[in-house]
Amino acid sequence: MSWLRHLNLKLLRQARVALAFVVIAASLMTLWVRHAEHKSALEVAAGVMDAEPSIKGTQLARLPQIPTAAFVPEFDPRVVLEDRENRIRDEFKVENISPGLEERVEFWLKIYSLYDSNKKVIHHADFPWVIYKVVDVEPIVNASHPKRRWQRNQVADRVVSGEAKLVREALKLIALRGENAKSDDPDLQRELPQVIESLKALPGDLRRQAQRAAREVRVQTGQRDFFAEGLARGPRYWPTMEEIFAKHRLPLELTRLPLVESSFNKEAHSKVGAVGVWQFMENTGRKFLTVNSVVDERKSVFKSTEAAARLMKENYMILGRSWPFALTAWNHGPGGVRKASQAARSKDFATVIERYQSRRFDFASTNFFPCFLAALYAERYSDRLFPDVIRMEQALVKPVKVPRPTLVTEIIKVAGLSMEEFISINPEFEKIALRKGKLPRGYVIHVPSDARSAVEAYMYDQGSERLTAAND
């Protein structure tokens, strides 16, 4: 039996050796993975894409900054903001509102008019016009490998995160060593001159600015393609919206706010529950509209526009007849805006966003009004900035009040509409329409202008006939 015991000991030693090799291999693999994670995200992405012949790794090794001419020939946002052709009303001209807003508005004009959604702008969160670099992820997201779009998006996200991290590391190095900062890392060394040059746009000590900026690196996705969609849809609704705002004696320019909020997408739903082209939250919507489990009038472009006009007017009066404050209140609430103004001891919008610091008065709140101004300028000069956009024709519809409970199928038949067309015009009644139910009495529907008389005659005549029959 000694030979068997000897064999068992021999096998045990061999097993221990094998286990040791496994542990060493696992450790080496862990170290390799950690090393890969610290590599430039662009290099990792290039490795993923190398299997696809149409996208070479060298093409992804360094994504170039986007030249202006690639999108809008001879585009100069400052020329647009100067409004040389006097297309902007005086009360919405940037120089008349607050001299400190020009650079911020110029940044958003670039986002709406220059960079599409494949362009990721890495910039300073507190001073957005300080742009460190623009990363183009189009070669990744439009490649044929990986096969699934979400996988390509993940690769693109890793690329952008890696580039943002590189900018952050460059800023930290500048904070330590100033303008003479250098690095042994070739990627970081290439980054330093551009980051230093961008940061010089801010006054004061470079190292202090870099220290602050390292905590405020942000990525903004370009919006040119989404904005173009809004410009295409907008003309379908603007004439009716302008009539509503004129009725309330409000500037017609305010009807361009949905370009910022939703690009005039009626189906727009935000992560926080805002709905429709005006992006009303449920609680705010209920103040002016019917919002329940069956009917949601936030989805109606026309009804929500009436509500928007009333809310705008209310905010304007509450906040001292200031459009910068009234529009900021659309995002932040009138109470929050009043608090910010009081804390900053100023009624000048640019001064308020410079002085007031609050976690709630965040990037979205401080940039909401500048976004609106940029969208207004871009729309007014859209013939130059978006010459190829095909505009939709005006929706010729008229309101009809429902005098009695009426089947949707009856209205559709009389108006000569399909179910899809009725829902497109009246999305607030989608649930009732899909189950072919009755519209409650007192609600307002919209029908094509040339069908209004027929629909009204049908509903009121039917009501008269029923009343006569009941009396008989």
Image (tube, rainbow, N blue to C red):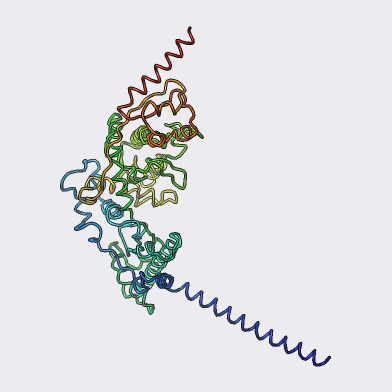
Q: Which quadrant, please, contains the N terminus?
A: bottom right
Tell me residue 389's x, y (percent). Answer: 25, 48
Residue 193, by quadrant, is bottom left
321 shown above or below 157: above
Residue 451 image position (x, y, % from top left):
33, 26
Q: Nearer the viewer, residue 352 or 363?
A: 363
The outermost residue toward the left is 85
Q: Nearer the viewer, residue 313 or 204?
A: 313
Viewer-proximal residue among 356 and 19: 19
Extreme right residue here? 1
In the image, residue 158 above or below residue 5? above
**What's the residue at 26%, 43% (across, down)?**
391
Q: Residue furthest top?
A: 472
Q: Is residue 76 above or below residue 443?
A: below
Left or right, residue 80 beside residue 440: left
Picture coordinates of residue 165, whole percent (x, y): 41, 67
* Residue at x 36%, y 36% (from the top left corner): 301
**Figure quadrant of residue 255:** top left
**Where's residue 35, x and y in %?**
48, 76
Direction bottom: furthest residue? 3
Q: How many marks?
A: 0
